[in-house]
Image (cartoon, rainbow, N blue to C red):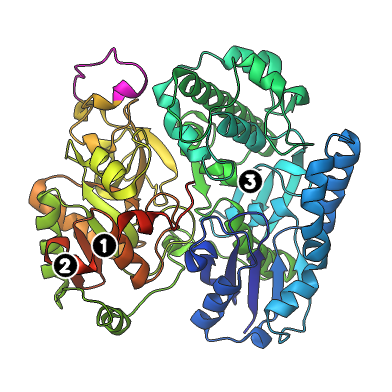
Amino acid sequence: MTAVLGISAYYHDSAAALVVDGEIVAAAQEERFTRIKHDHAFPTHAIAYCLEEAGLQPGDLNYVGFYDKPFLKFERLLETYLAFAPAGFRSFLKAMPLWMRQKLHLPREIRRELHGDYRRGIVFTEHHESHAASAFFPSPFDEAAILTLDGVGEWATASFGVGRGNRIELSHELQFPHSLGLLYSAFTYFCGFKVNSGEYKLMGLAPYGSPIYVDEILDKLLDLKEDGSFRLDLSFFNYCQGLTMTSKKFDRFFGGPPRAPETPLTQREMDLAASVQKVSEEIVLRIAAYLHATTGMKNLCLAGGVALNCVGNGRILREGPFDHLWIQPAAGDAGGALGAALYIWHQLLEEPRTPSLPDGQMGSLLGPRFSEQQIRAFLDTTPAVFHHLNDDDELDSRIVDLIEDEKVVGLFQGRMEFGPRALGCRSIIGDARSRKMQSVMNLKIKFRESFRPFAPIVLREHVSEFFEMEDEADSPYMLLVADVAADKRLPVADDGATGLDKLKGIRSVVPAITHVDNSARVQTVDPVRHARLHRLMTAFADRTGCPVMINTSFNVRGEPIVCEPEHAYHCFMGTDMDVLVLENFLLLKEEQPKTAVPDRDGYLAQFELD
């Protein structure tokens, strides 16, 4: 037996992944255990979980891998500070203590966190090698082009190459400070959202605006080449030398200072979101075309934080030259832990690889699971009123009844998902046909901005009936956007509405998941990867004729997705959620004692707004 532990840490979304004899045994983000969203600390809890899942101790590990090379990253930081000195002195003073205390001593830190029981070597892969490995090795392809895009690793901000069999080879890269991820994050910051957290909000805001700034961005902010490479005009940005993403010149160019967080959104922010989204899509499409021409490959694998931009991914699939696309579900830094482990197994140890169908990610259900005995033991410590239904069909029938009655259901079943998307095991679900469900979930369950859309889950065998996708198209990880099918759309009475007023329109027969531009971030559900959810949705479709539900992550704004029964119960009690399903235990809000309802403000105050 050969056990390989992969680790990502110290920047954002720390995680651990364990690969045993080439099989992905476990993977999880540290935030799920500590309840600190995007936790960057060393993934002590995630490592402990991975080892426990495999029944291993630290001394049983054969290899430990870290997802980037700290000395190369330190070199880039020092060279950048020197290039901009003395302007970057405040940023330098803020960064150096952590580097001197931890980041330059990672072998020591890793061995200490493993209780001194691990005495073998530690492998440091390059950041984009980790991303590339996470993209290709779990994919269903024997060979494929690979594209990685993010903010920055050591020096690289994008890379591409090919994967064949058990090897990857990266041949091209774009280097810091020129970065698509940082460009998008700069607009995220300027529009009042948190960097490394709010980029998906910017993507969701884009359809409310018009891309009126595209020409200005392409003329002034960057010089874009036909192959998708570009250079930024750094006078508009401040991330090299300061503590903000944009400069005063950026402020002047776009008509004033950045929007303050939590203040009302204006048309400017909506138009900026639409514009940078369109520019980003153009860049990615050009890179994809050049990559295809360079490699001649039919398949494409994607990873890196930019690969979470599912609108861009949808355009690559529809308009790009590749026949098939596979995206690592944990595309950001968390997935680097998995990539580091797989890189060691295949690339360094030269172990053979046989692609798995539908893929090797196992539905990305790689986190903890809890037995009915564990759940009952927890419930017995609470005043909860619950029902235990032994028969799965009876449970599904009860859930379908409740969803038909427009109840909001928290679903906690099976293994927790690895990556930022809830895929039906730590999800909140509801009736996509409901005209009130989108606003109810945003304002009473998630306590988040009203403009943010919700995603549909759809039975894969029915996907082309409701979305402009091919028959039984595969989108199991909620990473592709497609339009709602034309025959499912409705005429909109307020079609001339602008800005957030577009929210008022009923755009389709499944309005709860139809965004204002008639798009949806689609998750297809099949019986192989998500068997239990597929069974529930089939029961719902048999009853209603609708194979679509609404799906969002089981958490409130600022809270990591729930991991343990305790987290799910507290979220259920602290919100207006109607129903909680913990494996085969069913809890109805109306039956819970009033004394068990927590102070809502106190509950929400635990989580810093993202």
Q: Position of residue 315 (x, y in %)?
A: 48, 31
State the extent of the magenta-drawn residues as a range: 490-502
Label at residue 57: none
Specify few, some or many for label 2: CA neighbours under 10 Å numbering under 14, 14-19, or 20 or more. some
| Apparent side of residue 474 relative to residue 105 in the rendered image (left or right) | left
Percent x, y for residue 554? 35, 57
Identify which residue, 527 or 143, lies in the foreground: 527
Q: Which residue is mark 1?
A: 573
Q: Quick one: SS at disc 3?
A: strand
Tell me the distance, in whole angstroms, between the alpha carbons under discs 2 and 3: 51 Å
Quadrant for residue 526, please give it: bottom left
Q: Say which mark, if any, is on residue 146.
A: 3
Can residue 164 be seen here? The reply is no
**Looking at the image, is 541 positioned above or below residue 348?**
above
Q: Depth check: 516 or 377 in front?
A: 377
Q: CA distance from mark 1 to mark 3?
A: 44 Å
> Looking at the image, which residue is at 17% across and 33% down?
509
Q: Quarter of the image containing the N terminus?
A: bottom right
Q: Amino acid at mark 1?
A: Met
Q: CA distance from mark 2 to mark 1?
A: 9 Å
36 relative to 503 in the view: left or right: right
Q: Identify which amino acid the numbered label 3 is placed on.
A: Ile
Does the magenta-highlighted stretch encompass residue 318? no
Q: Position of residue 115 (x, y in %)?
A: 69, 84
Please report whichever mark, 2 or 1, sits nearer to the chain's N-terminal start. Answer: 1
Give the left or right position of residue 532, taking residue 359 as reference.
left
Taking depth in this image into account, of 470 and 334 the one nearest to the observer is 334
Image coordinates for residue 106, horizontal then vertical, percent:
78, 68
Q: Residue at x 57, y 16 (%)?
A: 214
Q: Relative to the observer, which residue lies in front, 564 or 543?
A: 564
Q: Is residue 310 visible?
A: yes
Q: Quadrant of residue 465?
A: top left
